[in-house]
Image (spheres, helix red, strand yellow):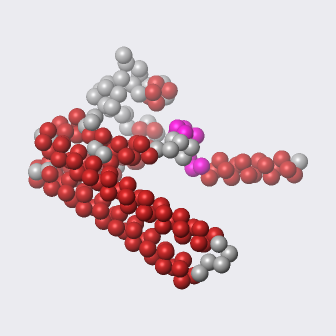
Amino acid sequence: MRNLLISLVVFGGLVLAQGPMAWRRGPAQRGMMPQRGLMAQRMAGQGLAGAGALKEHLGLTDAQVEQIRALRKQEAANMQAQAAAIRAKALELRQLTESPSADPAKVGALTLELKQLREKAIASRSRVSEQTRAVLTSDQQAKLTQLEEAVKLGPAARQAVALGLVVPPQAGGPSGGRASAGERMRGGPARL
C-alpha cells in the first residue's frame, strides 16, 4: 500500500511538472523529437515561403523579400557557428562542474565566457533585425510595429478563444477558410 501511494505521488508530480496542456501538444513540443530542421529552415528564410499575408499586409516588394531572405540565410550561418561555440563551452563547463576536483576559478572563468558568447549571439540577432527593418520603408515599419503589438496579445487572444469569450476568425485563416483540426475536435464548424 505504501509503495502504491509513493508511486501515485511521484506520478502526480511528474504530470504536474509537465505544465498545463502538455499532453495536448505533439511529441516535438514536449521535447521528444529533435526540431533543428525547423529552426534552420526559419532562419534560412524558408519562413517567408508562405508569407503572402505578411507580404500583402506590409506591401513588400519581391526585391524586399529577396533581401530579407538573404539576410536570414546569413544569420542562419552565423547562428550555427555561435550555437556550436555555446554548446561546446556549456559542455566544457558541465564536465568541469561534475568533476570532483573542479577549480572554482576555472568554473567562474568558463561561466563568464559562456555569458559573453550568449550576449554576442543576442547582439548579432539584434543587428540582423535592425538590418532587416532597414529594408522596409517607414510606412512598412509602422505597420510592422502594429503587428508586433498584436503578436504580444497572442496568448491573451488564444485564452479568450479557449474560454469562448472571442469567436476566432473563420475565413482566410491559415487553413484557408476551412476549420482546423483543433476546431473540428472542439466541435467547430467544418467547411469543405
Residue 46's x, y, as percent?
Answer: 30, 40
| Left or right placement of residue 187 versus residue 122 in this view | right
Residue at the image position 21 percent from the left and 59 percent from the top: 130
Magenta range is 18-27
**How would you classify the magenta stretch by its main secondary structure?**
loop
**Residue 41 is drawn in which quadrant?**
top left
When the figure is inspected, residue 172 is found, relative to residue 26, above or below; the finding is above
The answer to whether any part of residue 21 appears in the image is no
Residue 55's x, y, as percent?
Answer: 19, 39
Q: Nearer the viewer, residue 123 or 138?
A: 123
The answer to whether any part of residue 40 appears in the image is yes
Tally the marks: 0
Residue at the image position 17 percent from the left and 47 percent from the top: 67
| Left or right placement of residue 64 versus residue 180 in this view | left
When the figure is inspected, residue 136 is found, relative to residue 180, above or below; the finding is below
Residue at the image position 44 percent from the left and 36 percent from the top: 164
| Left or right placement of residue 134 versus residue 155 in this view | left
Outermost residue on the bottom side: it is 105
Decide whether residue 22 is among the magenta residues: yes
Residue 168's x, y, as percent?
Answer: 36, 34
Outermost residue on the right side: it is 1
Residue at the image position 39 percent from the left and 25 percent from the top: 179
Which of the image's four quarters has the C terminus? Answer: top left
When the figure is inspected, residue 26 is found, relative to residue 187, above or below; the finding is below
Residue 165's x, y, as percent?
Answer: 41, 39
